[in-house]
Image (cartoon, rainbow, N blue to C red):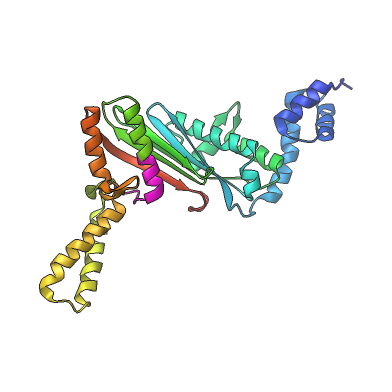
Amino acid sequence: MAEISAADVKALRDQTGAGMMDCKRALADSSGDVAKAGELLRERGLAKAVKREGRATSEGSVALAVKGAAGALVELACETDFVAKTDDFQKLVTELAQVAAADPKLDRAELLLEAQVGGEKVRDRISAAVAKLGENVVLRRVQRIVLEGQGTIGAYVHAGGKLGVLVGLRTTAKGPGLEALAKDLAMHVAAADPSPLAVERGGLAPDVLEREHRIFRSQVEQSGKPEKLWDKIVEGRIGKFYAEVCLVQQPFVKNPDQTVGQLLREASQKLGAPVEVTGFVRFKLGEASPS
């Protein structure tokens, strides 16, 4: 029988999070080969993981990463807030966001699960986390944002990973003023929750506008108000609708007397170059079903 050193046991425990006696048995069963012992523990850990599949995952964390002209948001779910706050869980979700940000192909959860990280699949890394943390862990969703041309990406994580936002800005401007603007806009999206389909009025699908106009028209026709006022009332309600769902029409959260569009025009003048929002992504923990 191969000699089992304390250093090998410690290394295996650090790698897998398994108990000391489990590590010793795995090393003995693999003739002292730490890598093979890790595989054995993974196999034994997977048996535990299977039992945890299907258990509710209402907690978790949202993490983001920005790498050059691309950023990614990842939501990793678990069963309890206690596990979500552990260093192991936070390290894993952060690592997954970094992997997704670095590879343009990893724009869906099922693709990220098959990606390689440190010589193993993300799917296997999550299974190892299930065994170590003792809870079901699910990669709920992934979304990337990519700049086309020059610009920057604003990033914001709120409430300990309960909410994350990425905002893409296209501009030739550079410097701390631009980065501060990007951060402010990410915070605005976090607070105001605009429609993900509408940066500007033109971004709203025609059928959405037709539906809202039809609803408002029906409402005003049944309101009892004079017919000569109907068009004006409908126009006013459409304006309020734009302010609710279109990012640039919304009052800026840090200065409600100014719209986001006005903020962008003001920033463009200060920075000496036009600044345009190209898109944004907002993840709130638990708002979507697992993918």
In the visual, does 56 lie left or right of 154?
A: right
Q: Is residue 128 visible?
A: yes
Is 186 rendered above or below residue 147? below
In the visual, does 287 lie left or right of 263?
A: right
In the visual, does 33 lie left or right of 56?
A: right
- Labels in figure, total: 0
Q: Is residue 107 visible?
A: no
Quadrant assignment, res 243: bottom left
Task: Using the image as rendered, state which of residue 173 and residue 258 is in the foreground.
Answer: 258
Q: Position of residue 149 (x, y in %)?
A: 29, 28
Q: Residue at x 23, y 55 (%)?
A: 206
Task: Using the image as rendered, state which of residue 281 and residue 269 is in the foreground.
Answer: 269
Assess whether residue 188 is covered by the magenta stretch.
yes
Q: Which residues are magenta?
A: 185-198
Quadrant assignment, res 144: top left
Q: Position of residue 15 (x, y in %)?
A: 70, 29
Is 98 rendered above or below residue 136? above
Q: Position of residue 213 (x, y in %)?
A: 22, 64
Q: Residue at x 29, y 50 (%)?
A: 250
Q: Position of residue 268 (x, y in %)?
A: 23, 33
Q: Residue at x 29, y 27 (%)?
A: 150
Is 103 rendered above or below residue 110? above
Q: Residue furthest right?
A: 1
Assess whether residue 215 is covered by the magenta stretch.
no
In the visual, does 225 lie left or right of 280?
A: left
Task: Using the image as rendered, state which of residue 78 and residue 251 is in the foreground.
Answer: 251
